[in-house]
Image (cartoon, grey):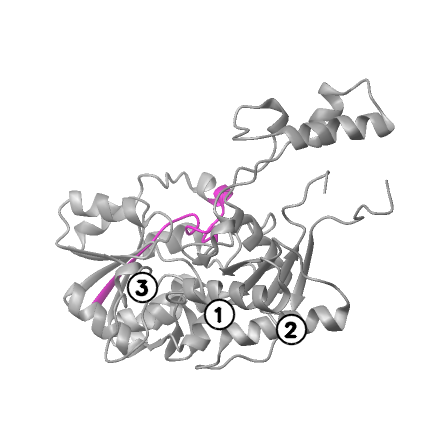
Amino acid sequence: MSDQERRTGTVSRGIRCPIIREGDDLATIVTDSVLGAAKAEGFALRDRDVISVTESIVARSQGNYATIDNIAEDVRNKLGGETIGVIFPILSRNRFAICLKGIAKGAKKIVLMLSYPSDEVGNELVSLDQIDEAGVNPYSDVLTLEKYRSLFGVNKHPFTGVDYVEYYGDLIRECGAEAEIIFANQPKTILSYTDSVLTCDIHTRARTKRILKEAGAKRVCGLDDILNAPVHGSGCNEKYGLLGSNKSTEDKIKLFPRDCKDLVLSIQDRILKETGKHVEVMVYGDGAFKDPQGKIWELADPVVSPAFTDGLIGTPNELKLKYLADNDFKDLSGEALKEAISESIRKKNGSLVGNMASQGTTPRQLTDLIGSLCDLTSGSGDKGTPVVLVQGYFDNYTS
């Protein structure tokens, strides 16, 4: 290895920023924070570095908030305000409970239909072993609350200690609505109780809406249809509605950010003018990965990245070094092996789909991969680094 070669590959750095408030000039703050960190820590920006900004500070700077009363009015207007079926919500105090307050205030009765044994993102109500022991078929069996309790008793979430069945039921009643809770996995089941349905699943919502409409539901909305326009001057999200929102205060939510494309282009342009380097920029929320211990899939947002510059479109196009070393060049070693692999990388072009030397590489969207890296880097608590600089992501062995 020559002295001119870089000795590191991808580096992910959390960048500390001031606390962001509504109305702040986020493009300037992010640019200044990244350049300030580079100067203080002694590193330089390079072409194709990626500056990633967490969605929460984007929404905060936009002032994209709404109250539970705004939610209630929109639900009432769109679903009639009588008996509403609320189906397939995730089990989350931060993500859904605050929305449920508004939904309950917009109805006289809520029939809450929970999927089991777990919600869409893997939060368990009961374990598969409990299901097996009880002889229940979750694909076809519908359980009343009484049947659920007799079979499974009280099941508290292993991380939060919350019995979400009791918690959601109490919350609905506290907001002035009657509550009935059932457990089922077929969307059509809810139509035995009401023909006005709010489906709260995230990634399967289009299919669920289609099934309900084909089965004769009178009114069908998803969370993406609630607050997709302002209510009395509230925030909104035209594309995702309540999806991607989370709790701000006891009666207010922060929505997923709106119209972020101008922000990422502005940051890209400012960095180019300041440094002469062409960086990529993205806004990111939840990462797309699954926790092996809790079985929870992290992605409660509708997408990992709601906005990104054009250089982040697509998927990786990589060769597997260990495959080349063990197969194509198994008789080489040392400098000869290095040069042979380097030449293979330099010659790669077009799609590598079907090429055995690319097997085992990850055919995921670049924004999903980089966003997941950034989510892990920034954390979800008190690190104070809502901006992440990723360097060397597009390097390979020849760089």
Between circles 1 and 2, the one closer to the viewer is: 2
What x and y, as percent, mark residue 36? 68, 74
* Marks 3/2: CA–CA distance: 30 Å
- Distance (Cα) linking label 1 and label 2: 15 Å
Q: At x 30% / y 59%, what residue is drawn?
A: 224
Looking at the rendered structure, the kind of residue marked 3 is Gly
Q: Is residue 162 magenta?
A: no
Residue 252 in which image quadrant: bottom left
Disc 1 designates what residue?
Answer: 56
Could you say which quadrant of the image residue 349 lies in? top right
The secondary structure type at the circle numbered 1 is helix
Where the C terminus falls, by quadrant?
Answer: top right
Instruction: Pick whichever of labels 1 and 3 is earlier in the sequence.
Output: 1
**Residue under the point 69% across and 26% down:** 323
Which numbered disc, 3 or 2, marks the residue that appears first in the sequence?
2
Q: Where, by quadrant of the figure, is residue 84 drawn?
A: bottom left
Q: Residues within 10 Å of mark 3 (few under 14, many from 20)?
A: many
Q: Which residue is mark 2?
A: 16
**Residue beneath the point at 52% across and 30% down:** 351
The location of residue 33, given as percent across then percent down, is 62, 73
Q: Which residues are magenta?
A: 108-130
Whether residue 161 is visible here, answered yes or no, is no
Residue 257 can be seen, yes or no: yes
